[in-house]
Amino acid sequence: PKFDAPKFDAPTITKPDIPKVDLPKVNVPKFDAPKFDAPAVNIPNFEAPKTPAFKPPTPSSNSYSSDFSSPSRDRDMSFEEEAQARLDAAAAEAKGEYKELDAAAKKVEKEAKKARGEANKAKREYQEKRNKACETRPGGKIICLRNPFDSGY
């Protein structure tokens, strides 16, 4: 199929005539900046020290031992075994002391939690009673104007 676009003639737009304005000429004085020579600065030369040449070692063909057995005991290990036994006993004693103190702390924490619950309950009761007392005062529960010398709360 053949497609023909419809012909469209755009209107011609003419450039508007702007009147010519003659502005007065302004004479600006000429400004010459003074010449400035920067002082010569001699920066000392710095040379980093030379690093020594490094040559990695070359392994020889027989540098590794093929004996994988455990080393023989040359000395008496009883002193080291005694020292280890003392360390183990000290650690066991410290663990027992920790367990006792931890149990005591948990007991105290449980009592403190119970006491906190009782204190919170008393606080709620106080707030309810104060709110009830403030309902009849000027300002109601929100402002609760009262004589601080004889109200007691």
Image: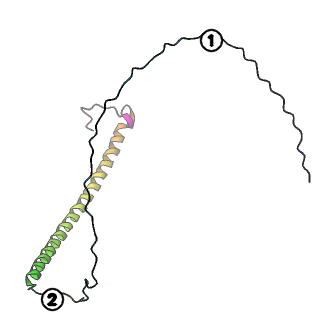
Q: Amino acid at mark 1?
A: Leu
Find disc 1 in the rendering and name its residue. 23
Res 31 visible: yes
The local crowd at label 1, few if under 14, some if 14 to 19, many if 20 or more residues have their Cα within 10 Å, is few
Q: Which label was assigned to residue 72?
A: 2
Quarter the C terminus occupies: top left
Residue 109, placed above or below residue 135:
below
**3D distance between C-alphas at marks 2 and 1:** 111 Å
Identify which residue is drawn at 90% across, 46% down: 4
Residue 5 is inside the magenta segment: no
Q: Which residues are magenta?
A: 141-148
Q: Position of residue 115 (x, y in %)?
A: 25, 56
Tell which of 84 and 13 is nearer to you: 13
Tell which of 142 and 63 is nearer to you: 63
**Does 28 sit left or right of 138 as displayed?**
right
Quarter the N terminus occupies: bottom right
